[in-house]
Amino acid sequence: MTRPLVITDCDEVLMHMVVPFAQWVDAEHGVLFRMEDASFAGALKRKECGTPLEAAEVWPLLDGFFRTEMARQTPIRGALTAMAAIARHADIVVLTNVGPDHQAARAAQLSALGLDAPVIGSRGGKGEPVRRLLDERQPSVAIFIDDLAGHHHSVAAEAPEVWRLHMVGEPAIADKIAPAPHAHARIDDWAAAEDWILARLTENIPAPSPEIA
């Protein structure tokens, strides 16, 4: 058995993203971000007429933000302190869907804030990359943290032994997002989340395997 492993998302878990992104698309692209439900793409509307952006228009905006505007992001309250405490008990890997193109910039962003952890810039569901990490590292226990319910479903299907924590650390959208049904817990505050994570690490046992629909 090797050291426990915590696999965490970045945006809205470690770093604020939607608020600086909304400020940028408003100022630079004439787009309003108004999240009324769990749909990120549906929250983007043209200021001049109020029509939603097409799905094909959303990724270029996200790509542009991550390419040039990551300096606008700031840490979620308590995230870095919690990561420092967790690192005394487990290895940490940041698994973020910014894609390979922005992986190095994300690693540099977090390193500048004192979090020197491996960063994987993935695309799509996170179940497969989590499974690969488990197979490579063979941790005694593993915990996955993400703000998107779809990733919890993906991880539950591919790596059911992983404990899954649903966290939406951005207060501006947390109440718009329902608890992920395939997560073991929903906690949006890092002080409480740190306690929950450390308890799972202390127990050092795999998560119970659910039936995945």
Image: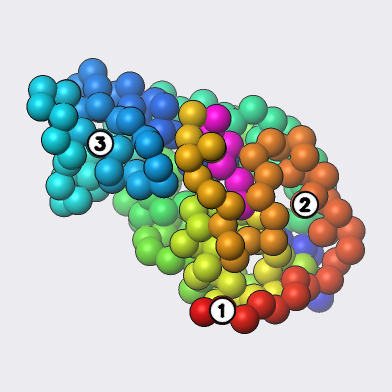
Q: Which residue is mark 1?
A: 212
The amino acid type found where label 1 is placed reads Ile
Nearer-the-camera pick, 128 or 149: 149
In magenta, the rendered stretch is 166-171
The answer for how far apart the CA atoms under marks 2 and 3 are is 34 Å
Q: Would you name the residue on which mark 2 appears?
A: 197
State which tag comes first along the sequence, 2 or 3.
3
Q: Position of residue 78 (x, y in %)?
A: 69, 30
On the image, the x and y values in percent for residue 158 come to: 55, 77
Snapshot quadrant of residue 42: top left
Q: Residues within 10 Å of mark 2 (few under 14, many from 20)?
A: many
CA neighbours of label 3 inside 10 A, class few (<14), some (14 to 19), many (20+): many
Residue type at the position of mark 3: Leu
Q: Which residue is located at x 15 percent, y 47 percent?
A: 54
84 sits to left or right of 151: right
Q: Which residue bears the numbered disc 3?
A: 44
Residue 159: horizontal and vertical position, in percent? 61, 75
